[in-house]
Image (cartoon, helix red, strand yellow):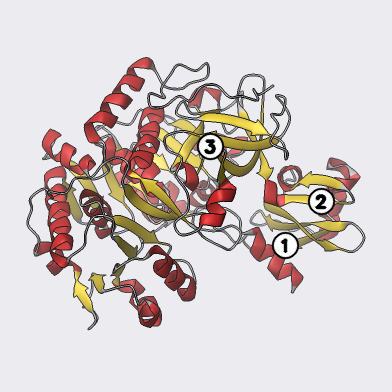
């Protein structure tokens, strides 16, 4: 059984030996040395500019920057922010898809101790406005393609004192980004920033429809980033492709992790299968990250994309959704030299690598999300907070140096999620006899039907075994007889057809009676948030109207 009183906390020196750790002793030592050397996010670019000034740090289309050039631009931007009156602890928001200015703003604000808030661009304008207001941002940077949205919400942004436009002819109310950056001096900012200072606000997944702002300190972010560095053996020899949106916690798992290792980052504006594979091919990318895993299926379905040579990829990492065995085999065939990494993480723990399933366990532990990383203590408990025996499902609780302190200006939600010294993830897992975890479901996705508890993922997994089913989302709907009835939303594989009766008949063979869907609907695509998680509240709303 899991101990009622967990093992002693592993921090401030958390990289202790654990039975299932994927970190070697030498990597652990490098990890600790790196933490002491960098300490803050802003120091990443400053250190690398000294170590290898002439190596490429950032590539974006025709834009190619060395570490020296990137650090110079970051310093100029930081100095311009200071000259504007921005001070340590102030907040600056940015509304943009992936562009170099997002990278520069990330590190410039970190160097002066201001808090960066990259805003989700794919929300309704009113939601974007509410989040910017919630953040207390006094500066808003935005890309020209976001200008129409900014103009819709600008009147309500009473706390924003300056608007800075990236690219295009600046709107009358906006400052030109390049001119603003070049007004600053290239010196290192004389601002004392510590690992305990706030670094960034990141929106939580918002699968319930309500996003909160998780508060990451520099220390939180660095522990999580270096965990990724260590697990994936990242180094200055690597070239990583950053295509996932930087307004997501992936800014830490991918951008900060790659740059902390000294690797070159190839930045892609947004996901496009052909452009993705072209970048992998032309830039000789060694580290490919595809989240969620099904995006790889999209890539493989485009002939122009798979025509590129990608055999030089040494690491393929994914997370955020099921990584089925057949998809793993497709990746292995197409990227024969790539080690496969599958991880689980959450914004409240500063991102991925809470658990990692390493390359050598992908087959014998298929379906597992891996072992808990060495920087965390963890417990698996029932609804009363009691430890559950190995093999039984329970909520995953975490604590460690990358766990955030809470949500900005959301005290009630903070008290609920972070209590008794533990992060209550809301994720249900079970642990096997070897210490590998398996994701079961979200507590909130449990369906109570006829007095029984049914985890939606169990039903989804059964339906996914049908040869015509590509994706499945299962949820409960109110029912006067059963309390809740089980409903399944299905996306079929391209070129296939199926009926509701066919899938209900299949479910009768695959599931016990109380776990069978009562209804099935077919969709062209499931609604997802930017991290790839299915928005079941939207599915419920659609079926309830």
The residue lying toward the viewer, choosing from 283 and 209, is 209
Residue at the spot x=43%, y=73% of the render? Answer: 129
Which of the marked residues, 2 or 3, is nearer the chain's N terminus? 3
Give the secondary structure at mark 1: strand
Q: Position of residue 329 (x, y in %)?
A: 56, 34
Q: Mark 3 = which residue?
A: 421
Q: Residue at x 61, y 38 (%)?
A: 324
Q: Is residue 445 left or right of residue 370?
A: right
396 shown above or below 147: above
**Residue 504 point in image, percent of width and height:** 85, 53
Q: How far is disc 2 from disc 1 in space, using C-alphas?
A: 23 Å
Name the residue that disc number 1 marks: 522
Residue at 89%, 57% in the rendered image: 482
Q: Which residue is at the front of the view, 119 or 85?
A: 85
Q: Is residue 279 visible?
A: yes
Q: What residue is disc 2 on? A: 448
**Where is the C terminus found, in terms of image quarters?**
bottom right
**How busy is the neighbourhood of tag 3: few (under 14 within 10 Å), some, or many (20 plus)?**
few
Using a 10 Å C-alpha cutoff, classify the residue at mark 1 as few (fewer than 14 neighbours), some (14 to 19) or many (20 or more).
Answer: some
């Amino acid at each position: 059984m899991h101990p009622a009183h967990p093992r002693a906390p592993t921090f401030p020196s958390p990289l202790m030996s654990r039975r299932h750790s994927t970190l070697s002793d030498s990597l652990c030592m490098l990890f600790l040395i790196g933490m002491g050397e960098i300490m803050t996010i802003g120091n990443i670019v400053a250190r690398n500019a000294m170590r290898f000034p002439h190596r490429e740090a950032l590539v974006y289309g025709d834009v190619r920057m060395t570490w020296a050039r990137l650090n110079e631009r970051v310093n100029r931007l930081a100095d311009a922010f200071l000259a504007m009156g921005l001070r340590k602890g102030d907040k600056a928001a940015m509304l943009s898809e992936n562009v170099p200015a997002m990278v520069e703003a990330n590190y410039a604000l970190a160097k002066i101790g201001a808090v960066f808030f990259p805003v989700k661009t794919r929300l309704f304008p009113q939601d974007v406005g509410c989040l910017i207001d919630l953040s207390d941002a006094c500066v808003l940077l935005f890309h020209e393609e976001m200008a129409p949205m900014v103009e819709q919400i600008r009147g309500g942004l009473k706390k924003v004192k300056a608007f800075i436009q990236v690219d295009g002819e600046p709107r009358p109310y906006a400052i030109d980004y390049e001119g603003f950056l070049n007004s600053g001096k290239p010196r290192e900012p004389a601002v004392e920033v510590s690992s305990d200072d706030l670094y960034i606000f990141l929106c939580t997944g918002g699968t319930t429809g309500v996003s909160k702002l998780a508060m990451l300190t520099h220390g939180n972010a660095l522990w999580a980033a270096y965990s990724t560095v260590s697990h994936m053996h990242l180094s200055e020899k690597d070239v990583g492709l950053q295509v996932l949106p930087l307004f997501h916690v992936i800014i830490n798992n991918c951008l900060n992790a790659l740059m902390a290792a000294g690797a070159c980052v190839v930045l892609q504006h947004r996901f496009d299968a052909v452009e993705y594979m072209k970048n992998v091919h032309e830039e000789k990318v060694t580290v490919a990250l595809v989240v969620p895993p099904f995006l790889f299926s999209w890539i493989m379905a485009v002939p122009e994309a798979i025509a590129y040579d990608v055999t030089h990829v040494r690491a393929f990492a994914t997370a955020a959704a099921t990584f089925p065995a057949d998809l793993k085999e497709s990746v292995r065939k197409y990227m024969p030299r790539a080690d496969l990494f599958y991880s689980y993480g959450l914004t409240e723990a500063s991102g991925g690598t809470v658990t990692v399933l390493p390359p050598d366990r992908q087959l014998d532990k298929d379906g597992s999300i891996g072992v808990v990383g060495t920087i965390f203590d963890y417990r698996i408990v029932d609804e009363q907070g009691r430890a559950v025996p190995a093999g039984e499902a329970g909520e995953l609780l975490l604590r460690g140096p990358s766990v955030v302190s809470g949500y900005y200006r959301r005290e009630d939600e903070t008290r609920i999620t972070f209590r008794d010294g533990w992060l209550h993830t809301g994720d249900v897992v079970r642990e096997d006899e070897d210490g590998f975890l398996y994701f079961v479901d979200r507590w909130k996705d449990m369906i109570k039907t006829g007095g029984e508890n049914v985890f939606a993922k169990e039903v989804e997994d059964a339906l996914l075994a049908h040869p015509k089913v590509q994706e499945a989302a299962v949820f409960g709907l109110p029912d006067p007889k059963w309390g809740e009835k089980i409903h399944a939303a299905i996306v079929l594989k391209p070129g296939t057809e199926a009926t509701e009766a066919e899938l209900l008949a299949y479910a009768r063979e695959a599931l016990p009676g109380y776990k069978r869907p009562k209804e099935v609907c077919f969709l062209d695509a499931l609604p997802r948030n930017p991290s790839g998680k299915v928005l079941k509240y939207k599915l419920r709303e659609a079926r309830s109207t």
